[in-house]
Amino acid sequence: MKIKNICCIGAGYVGGPTMAVIAQKCPDIDITVVDINENRIAAWNDEDVENIPIYEPGLSDIVKEARGRNLFFSTDVDAAIDKADMIFISVNTPTKTYGIGKGMAADLKYIELCARQIARVAKDDKIVIEKSTLPVRTAAALKNILDNTGNGVKYQILSNPEFLAEGTAVQDLLNPDRVLIGGDIDTEKGQEAVNALVDIYATWIPQENILTTNVWSSELSKLTANAFLAQRVSSINAMSELCEVTGADVGEVSRAVGKDSRIGPKFLQASVGFGGSCFQKDILNLVYISKTFGLNEVADYWEQVIIMNDHQKRRFAEKIVKTLYNTVAGKKIAILGWAFKKDTNDTRESAAIYVTDYLLNEQADIVVYDPKVNKEQVFADLEYLGTHSSEEIRERVQVLTSAMDATREAHAVAVLTEWDEFQELNWQKIYDSMLKPAFLFDGRRLLEGKSKRKIGFEYYSIGS
Ligand code: UDX
Ligand code: ADP
């Protein structure tokens, strides 16, 4: 089966970059990425590719190459579904904020809407691919909706979880450790659908790195991979607190531990806490599924990873308050970095949001600078928590476009995202413009501490 037309529903952090790379590598396949968000689609179509809605190193160039040739962005979801042989579902699956499973289960309403729309529109057989991270057995629900509400059309459902990390999405897509495709491999039609997707990836990825499994293994592997990665971060963050009270240094500990080839050096960087749209959500999914099956010990085991992460964010904020003589009321705290990691403009679950919220509880005045995140996003993130009114947030939080301006006359500076440019700042000048004593809290272990102390900063770094 040769695929000629692909539709991707959802032009977000997953759908956008993934389709851009497939379009670049497979110029003979027409790909239409659709979204109900008109502004987002307009931004993807912006004449100047620097204005696409997602910041990812290398992505603009790929969009420039493929857009208008075989990569299209549109709000006409029906037309794209109708034309496609293969449909990727890449819509958001946030944690439920209401009802059963509130705060834990994934909210599948967007997925379900997609399924119903596909069922309504499709007039010929389609391969439907879950790209969004989903709880195990979502494929079964998808199939159920498609088979029972469709126009008698036959569907093959595949799970093809995305392993790209934001900030390195293009590289991850071009050279993935593996591609995982789950399908109904025990049936001829199912195997055919799996092969059709394998053929697409095999255009640029070695066959041995393309793994095929049954659908449920694929769905669960994605949750497992993210849970393991998040667990490593929580593990090293737990050690960071112990390091601070014992006089050990967490950087030295991770280096020593990471040299063990069984452990390896990656994902051992202590921080103010992991963020991003995946880790917390996926672990909560895992916890929820385990509880649903009565596996309480399994659920508790994974939940601890989140408890540790929440503790780390709160502990960092508390450290600021305690160090500033137990009060930050009316004091100006500069937050450097709002994105959940460097090289992305994504802020979902970023530690900066929670640290700032805590400091607002303590009546601090906050000034934020992030090279890629705009003012409205910062306000929206804080408003989403619902702890402070929109008026209060806009009164107490300022978002500026330079680190120098943000830190001027501040009582303290907190580094919350590891942007490279923060290392290059003129820290002497920042020190000179701050109130004294000038406190510097490094939530990323990004800065070289000795030189900062020499300048005169009261410098605190996580895990030292
Ligand atoms: C993650 C997975 O890595 C990716 O495979 C999956 O597809 C989606 O979820 P992402 O959330 O984009 O990707 O970024 P990642 O690099 O995993 O970082 C997640 C968070 O952990 C960030 O806040 C990062 O700063 C933090 N982190 C990561 C640490 O604090 N320390 C580390 O050592 C590594
Ligand atoms: P991810 O990180 O998973 O890509 P995003 O939130 O960045 O998540 O992107 C998901 C996109 O899916 C959003 O732009 C949203 O508007 C879009 N979306 C959600 N539901 C639908 C739908 N039914 N039809 C089309 N697009 C949708």
Image: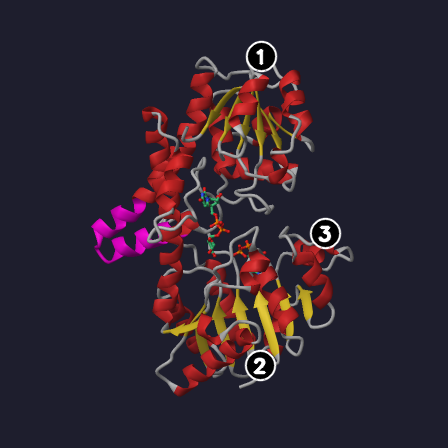
Residue 284 position, x and y percent, is 36, 50
User: Which residue was labeled with disc 1?
Assistant: 436
Magenta region includes residue 217: no
Q: Which residue is mark 2?
A: 3
Ligand 2 lies under 8 Å from the Cβ of mark 2 = no
Amino acid type at image mark 1? Lys
Q: Choose between 429 and 132: the one closer to the eye.
A: 429
What residue sits 34% from the left and 44% below the top?
Answer: 305
Of callouts 3 and 2, which one flags the residue occurring earlier in the amino acid sequence? 2
Residue 174: x percent and y percent? 57, 64
- The magenta-colored residue range is 282-303
**Rendered residue at 50%/22% (across/down):** 459
Q: Can the viewer see residue 365? A: no
First in sequence: mark 1 vs mark 2: 2
Q: Position of residue 114 (x, y in %)?
A: 51, 66
Under mark 2, the amino acid is Ile
Dot 2: within a 10 Å radius of its alpha carbon, few (fewer than 14), some, or many (20 or more) residues? some
Earlier-in-chain disc, 3 versus 1: 3
Q: Is residue 301 within the magenta segment?
A: yes
What quarter of the picture does the C terminus occupy? top left
Nearer to us of marks 3 and 1 is: 1
Magenta-drawn stretch, dominant element (helix, strand or loop): helix
- In 3D space, how far apart are the residues under numbered discs 3 and 1 (Cα atoms)? 40 Å
Does any portion of residue 367 appear in the rendered image? yes
Kindly check if marks 1 and 2 are in contact, taking CB atoms under 8 A apart as contact.
Answer: no
Q: Can you tell which mark lies on residue 355?
A: none
**Above or below, comparing residue 402 to residue 117 in the picture:** above
Residue named by callout 3: 51
Query: In the image, is 406 to the left or to the right of 192?
Result: right
Q: In the rendered view, does 125 fall on the left or right side of 182?
A: right
For label 1, the crowd category at 10 Å Cα-Cα, with few meaning under 14, some 14 to 19 and many 20 or more, is some
